[in-house]
Image: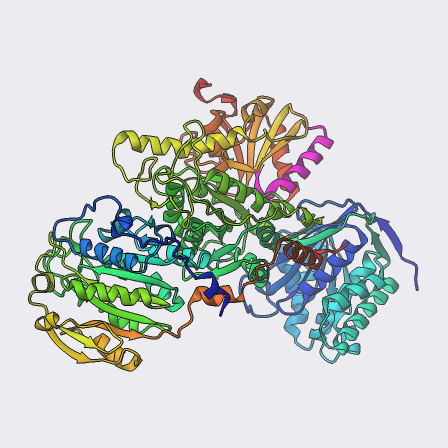
Amino acid sequence: MAPSRLVRLPEHTVEIVSDAGEGAQKAAIAFAQLCAKAGNGLWTVEIIPSEIRPPPHTIGSASGNRIRLAERSKVTNAGNRANVVLAFNEMALLSRLEAGSLADDVLVLIDDHWATHDDERYRISYREVLDKVRSRGATIREVPLERETIRHAEDAQQGKNMFAVGLLCALYNKDMDVLDDVIRGIFKGKAREVIELAVRLADAGYQYGVKHFEQRFEIQAVPTDIPKVAMNGNTALALGAVSAGFEICSMYPITPATSASHELSGIFEDFGGFVHQAEDEIAAIGVALGASYAGKTALTITSGPGMALKTEFQGLAVMTETPLVIVDVQRGGPSTGLPTKIEQSDLLHALYGAPGDAPKVVIAPSTIEECYYILSLARKIAEEFRMLVIVLSDANLATGQQLFDRPDVSQTPRRPPLDLSPVPLGTLPYDWDPTTGLSQRLIPGQPGGMGVTTSLNHDRNGKACYDAERNQRGHSMRSRKLAALQQSLNAPSVHGPPEGDLLLVGWGSTRGAIEEAVDIARGEGLAVSSVHLQFLSPLPPGLREIFAGFRQIITVELNYSDDWEDPLITKENRRYGQLAWILRAATLLDIDCYAKVPGRPYMPVEIMDEIKRILGNQSGIESPAETFPAIAGAN
Amino acid sequence: MSMLAELCVIESGAADPHTLDEYESETPRWCKGCGDHGVLAALQRVLRKNNLDPEDVVSVSGIGCSSRLPHYLNTYGFHGIHGRALPISTGVRLARPELPVVVIMGDGDCFSIGGNHWLHAIRYNIDAVVLVLDNEVYALTKMQVSPTTPDGWKTNTTPHGTYLQPMNPLSVVMGMTNVSFLAQTATWLPAHLDETIEKAWEHHGLSFVRILQRCPVFMPKAFGDGGLNFPVVFLEHEDGIPVHPLLLKRGATRAHNHRDINEAQRVAVSVDPAPMGLLYRNPDVPTYEEIRWNRQERPDHRTFVERLDALMDRYTVS
């Protein structure tokens, strides 16, 4: 074997893409597990075709994964442009190029059999695409994916993905014996010949790589004693729902939320729970609310269009003070929008999407690990405050996979039996504490607590009433609970020093990319910090004090805002990102935003560019930055 | 005995039988002459007859005149939103199958805005008594056309007369898979109403009862001046709704086998004369909550934690 040069790297981002059905996904899973077992930190994201059966060998057919692996044990986002792409054909490669996912100097591993394919069109297309990437600075390394695979397998379609993962094992100098174990684990339950063939092909790929790659990479990792789990955000939500003690999940299928319910449907009955697939989104929340009214712990899981259909029931939950949790796995909107892609556009809808004044709690997980823990928090708030809690996840968390410390399930709280002890006849169903708005909840079956729970305005004894005084009272008691909750929260911590030129404010899944950009920017001497909000309603205390430490504040969010440069856009009519609206209203500070709708996560480098644009051009921005920090002097 | 059946045993705790006024709450605020009063009274009589503890009964309604009923019944009640009483009831039944549920809806509530839930609730066959108080008009919002308003009648949204034939809810119910109980009665036949609700209460499964009643304010002429000139035929069967001899002057009787689905479907499509009594009953259709509860395990805390731990193993990589 020719000795190859080993280049040590802190991290790399790799994409594996094939036609849908060729197994790039499985190859990626195997490679990710291989890296995880070695102790590398990881973030993986699926590359999903937008149609179920797209025509093969087209841009629309590209399917696979992006894997970011690092020396450090924690990777918080999907990274920047990819360093390596392993493509099964040139159209899959082209699709990633056009998506802006590849670094200019990307190393391309591509199946060479298209170069000599019988069909001239493929040969031409192959050369053209390779010339194009090469001209941008890419290194092309043609590999005999199909040619080598057919030496071992009858059908190259059913095995070249394993040859491919062997190549990556060699490229990243990983242990082939571990890959052997990983593959046996993935194919567990399959016929012996299938497993042996997969292992043989992976080994063939490995041997080929070791022999022919003149340069290989070493991303060292320190295996840790702390056990780690790897899962996507929807699985984390499902497992989190179980460990939080939920008993009923009532849902209706909608992308990208449904896979959480798939996971739950398979396991929930073993834990004393149900997944109920209702006839529509409205019934889904209705069943959850009915179950909660009857004393069980219930949630419903949906995405934007489903949230819209659930708004009337949200108002009912608020009015009747029935505890309820809604998970909204956000996708691109409006309307059907971008069903499989990420956006953070449901924040204002979550806050205000219900008739009348309907105070709700809105919280957002920022990592996949948080997706696991957040439902315990949501349940606690919903039950203690008799409130509707909306959890805003998104498509990035839903389909990304991350490694995190294995949760300690031994601390799972015991589920207490339903308390049906009698209450004195005449016990008030809304015996509001005048300071906090909190009141004891009565459950059907409790002797003495009989009475109607009504969607009409009502007084402390639950009776419908229409007069001004008691309408005002009901509203203030429901609103007071938000203030009481806010008082119990801690101020968020600032990532970076508490003073500087620029503060980025984020929420949800953008956290990893924002903090990474901030770290790099600080490394380059820029005075930038960030703060990430888990609570969007109520907002946590201490924001004004934090904001006072910075000359400029912008939110970074994945939703729409008008650009200052757009035609007709003025200070008066500009529409801001959604968190920016809220913070401007709450603080009277002239908070700007970096808010776009690319349908994919932000790359840290994009946020970095924005930081440089702002800090490198302090006075040149055509924004009203000069009026900062207060709008029209109000304070 | 299934686990659910054990759970569903309601302990009639009171040694002394409950009195009627134990089921009474505030004074109803329906119009004078409204049939809702009669349905409330019939329901209270059924609860007393079954000697149910008021705290063990849940009444659920939507929005409309009739949906105020839970306010006037001294049990647990949920007065929800328009058209959505059935999903809420399904949630209650799934959560607490030991609590009897009665659902009260109007014709607009059930057949129009709640139509989808109506169809699917029949298919779920939750164990609940479902009463639709059909006055053929939207009354609370002041006289708009409803799905059952007679052809050509004038309402505030059809001032020149309705455009469409009315819907026949009975044939819709009989077209649904898993239908287990369908009856029709009217508030101007109080004894028949009582017997029908009682029969519905006895049934294990979704007992769908359409109750015809006139709105004295907006539709006083409906149902032949509130039943005076309304052609009906009483369905007769030894196990059906008894037909009191006094009823015979209101209409003829016909023998009907409510266990025969084809016969029930034929009767359901006939509207003139309107069939009164038990159209269909099949006590063997499993209820949704039974199906779900019988599949569900209820592990103790230790087993719960062990299973969660094993689940975590599946996702552990290093």
Query: Residue drawn at (83%, 65%), measured in percent from left and top?
Result: A206
In the depicted structure, whether residue A110 falls above or below residue A364: below
* Residue A635 as seen in the image, left or right of residue A516: left
Q: How is the image coloured?
A: rainbow
- Marker count (numbered): 0
The reply to whether the magenta stretch includes residue A513 is yes
Q: Residue B184, how many percent across, how many down?
A: 22, 68
In the depicted structure, whether residue A275 falls above or below residue A344: below
The reply to whether the magenta stretch includes residue A287 is no
Viewer-side residue, B204 vs A404: B204
Q: Residue B136, how many percent across, how many down?
A: 17, 60
Question: Does residue A137 appear anywhere in the picture?
Answer: no
Viewer-side residue, A454 vs A91: A454
Query: Residue drawn at (51%, 59%), measured in percent from left and top?
Result: A274
In the depicted structure, whether residue A489 falls above or below residue B184: above
* Residue B253 as seen in the image, left or right of residue A35: left
Q: Residue A164, how many percent across, how many down?
A: 75, 65
Q: Quadrant of the N terminus of chain A?
A: bottom right
Viewer-side residue, A277 vs A465: A465
Question: Does residue A218 appear anywhere in the picture?
Answer: yes
Query: Residue drawn at (60%, 44%), measured in percent from left and top?
Result: A602
In the depicted structure, whether residue A324 falls above or below residue A123: above
* Residue A140 as seen in the image, left or right of residue A207: left
Query: Residue drawn at (32%, 62%), measured in percent from left and top?
Result: B129
* Residue B203 as seen in the image, left or right of residue A560: left
Which residues lie in the magenta part? Answer: A507-526
Residue B187 quadrant: bottom left
Viewer-side residue, B265 vs B180: B180
Is most of the magenta stretch helix, strand or loop? Answer: helix
